[in-house]
Image (cartoon, rainbow, N blue to C red):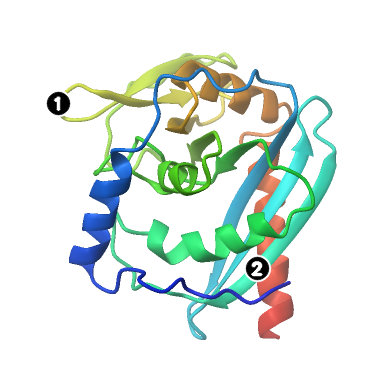
């Protein structure tokens, strides 16, 4: 594990954070298909918090996309750098996630975030933020639809329905990864199409509702937090 340092000039207020979001959002790339599903490396990132000690632990787990075997993993632990503000959660997580990614001995390939990309009130969730900062293709796979409406997709695996904003914009998709099980909510982060993001999610969720990237990163960051705070 390694400690996390908050970069100089990081936003200290909600107003500053929103200004950073506005500036970075203009750099999101939405017209690239992204790497094909089931090929190369794919990396899951996730974070866990110790609220009493104001500590965040991040994990990055690289899988072989074809076999879902673990190729490499890394963690980073440090102080929570920003207060809890809905819509600005990326500022609490980005420094630790970047530190974990930097410790990987291999290039991460596509990065899967446990959260949102375009499916965000400001159209710039963690997956988009991370993608712009790193230049990597990123997607968000969330457990709930946040503030967006959707019709329940068909019961079969692979069924989906659009995730819609109030103005009718499709910001993501509700995707059924397991037959008869609650869908996950997929959105583009950076340099991937929405269809490609869903294809990756299905390829990574061959046995469970959540992608294997998310499951492994979740377990690793929780373990890192326990080892640091006990």
Residue 222, above or below 65: below
Kindly report the distance in space between the C-alpha atoms of the residues bearing marks 1 and 2.
Answer: 39 Å
Q: Residue 76 — which label?
A: 2
Q: Which quadrant of the figure contains the C terminus?
A: bottom right
Q: Position of residue 34 (x, y in %)?
A: 56, 22
- Of labels 1 and 2, earlier in sequence is 2
Residue farthest along the front direction in this orientation: 8
Residue 87 image position (x, y, % from top left)? 29, 54
Q: Secondary structure at mark 2?
A: strand
The quadrant of the picture occupied by the N terminus is bottom right
- Identify the residue at horizontal 53%, vertical 25% (top origin): 197
Q: Nearer the viewer, residue 44 or 208?
A: 44
Instruction: Give coordinates of residue 200: x percent, y percent.
Output: 61, 25
Residue bearing mark 1: 167
For label 1, the SS is loop
At horizontal 60% and vertical 17% (from top left) the residue drawn is 157
């Amino acid at each position: 594990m390694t400690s996390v340092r908050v970069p100089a000039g990081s936003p200290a207020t909600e107003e500053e954070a929103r200004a950073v979001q506005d500036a970075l959002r203009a750099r999101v790339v939405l017209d690239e298909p992204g790497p094909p599903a089931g090929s190369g490396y794919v990396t899951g990132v996730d974070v866990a918090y110790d609220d009493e000690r104001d500590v965040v632990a991040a994990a990055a787990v690289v899988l072989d996309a074809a076999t879902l075997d673990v190729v490499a993993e890394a963690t980073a632990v440090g102080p929570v750098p920003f207060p809890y503000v809905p819509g600005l959660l990326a500022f609490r997580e980005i420094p630790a996630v970047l530190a974990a990614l930097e410790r990987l001995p291999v290039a991460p390939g596509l990065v899967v975030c446990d959260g949102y990309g375009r499916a965000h009130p400001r159209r710039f969730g963690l997956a988009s933020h991370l993608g712009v900062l790193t230049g990597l293709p990123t997607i968000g796979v969330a457990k709930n639809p946040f503030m967006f409406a959707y019709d329940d997709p068909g019961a079969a695996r692979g069924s989906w329905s659009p995730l819609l904003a109030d103005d009718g914009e499709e910001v993501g998709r509700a995707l059924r990864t397991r037959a008869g099980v609650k869908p996950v909510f997929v959105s583009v982060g950076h340099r991937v199409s929405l269809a490609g993001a869903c294809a990756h999610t299905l390829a990574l969720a061959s046995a469970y509702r959540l992608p294997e990237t998310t499951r492994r990163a979740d377990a690793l960051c929780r373990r890192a937090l326990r080892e640091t705070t006990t």
